[in-house]
Amino acid sequence: MMRSPGRKITTAAAFVALGLIMGYIESFIVLPVGIPGVRIGIANIAVVLAMYLLGPVYGGCILLVRVILSSMLFGSGASFLYSLCGGAFSYVVMVLLSRHGFSIYGVSVAGAVVHNIVQTVVAYILMGSIYVMYYIPPLMFIGVFAGLLVGFVSDIMYKRLRRIMIFNEEGI
Amino acid sequence: MNKRDIILLAVVIVISAVLFVPTLFHKSGTEAFVYVNKELYGRYDLAEHKELIIDSNGITDDIVIGDGYVYMKDATCPGRQCVHSGRISGNNESICCAPAGVMIVVKSEKDSEYDAITR
């Protein structure tokens, strides 16, 4: 796909920027659940795309940089911990599923659901109250539809970007 | 979307539905337990009108109790997800304002007696 490391790194930076903007826009959409970081996961589009286009290692680095930057820019110390745990676990699950015959839809649904569950578990650990676990069933349900939406957008973008990136490689 | 994706979707939806069903049969609660940074701040009868202002972790939470409900009227935390949680009344329902470390849990009388023993 893309062999030049310089080009790969600059593309990765563009994905970080994309993820940051998406995360910022997303911060205006608040789901009625009292757990920070439980979102539709629009920013996950950038991570899913990077994982498919640049590979799992680059995708993971993009996720890490995006989480650190967005916590410094828009968030607090607590939100960093929530996003980092949610992001890391969901990313591992997404990489594993993408290697076992699941399509981009299944991968992003699993990512969204795992992200929501892990954040609830972090809330349980930080708040010390088991009652936040009652949020898990509705959050799993929301995660399915949020994940499908992310998968749908990622699928379209992946097909187009793949063509553009191949074109660049051959054209320039 | 392939076959595996559809199986995954079905499994997740079924699990969430199975876990969700018991929460539909919640009795309504009678008491609100308010916790601040894991410590019990106070327990309040849901029938009595009361407004609590709690300052914690640099955030102010405005909690309103009364008419069998409890809700977060206002909060200065970022995102204000606790305010968007709406009002709760069912046994074991909760509102959590994570940045402030404030947790509100509704319990029924029977459960709260049991709770007082175990804690």
Image (tube, coloured by chain):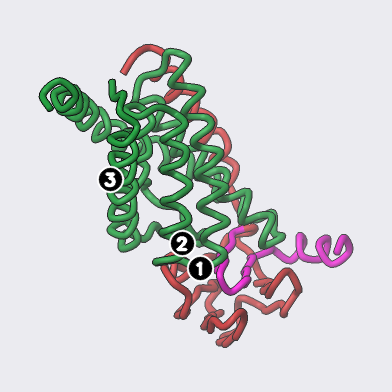
| Percent position of residue A114, x then y | 52, 37
Res A60 seen here: yes
Q: Quadrant of residue A89?
A: top right
Label 1's element? loop
Q: Which mark is residue A71?
A: 2
Confirm whether circles 1 and 2 share one chain. yes
- Image position of A95 with respect to A11: above or below: above
Q: Name the subunit of mark 2.
A: A
**What residue is rendered at 64% in x and 58% in y?**
B92
Q: Quadrant of the N terminus of chain A?
A: top left
Which mark sits nearer the N-terminus, 3 or 2? Answer: 3
Q: Quadrant of residue B115?
A: bottom right
Q: Is residue A62 left or right of residue A45?
A: right
Q: Nearer the viewer, residue B75 or A162?
A: A162
Name the kind of residue labelled 3 in the image. Answer: Ala
The chain in red: B
Q: Which residues are magenta?
A: B93-119
Whole-angstrom CA distance, mark 1 to mark 2, is 6 Å
Which mark sits nearer the N-terminus, 1 or 2? Answer: 2
| Percent position of residue A103, x then y | 36, 19
Residue furthest to the left in view is A171
Shown colour of chain A: green
Asked if residue B12 lies in the magenta stretch, the reply is no
Whole-angstrom CA distance, mark 3 to mark 2, is 18 Å
What residue would you read off at disc 1? A76
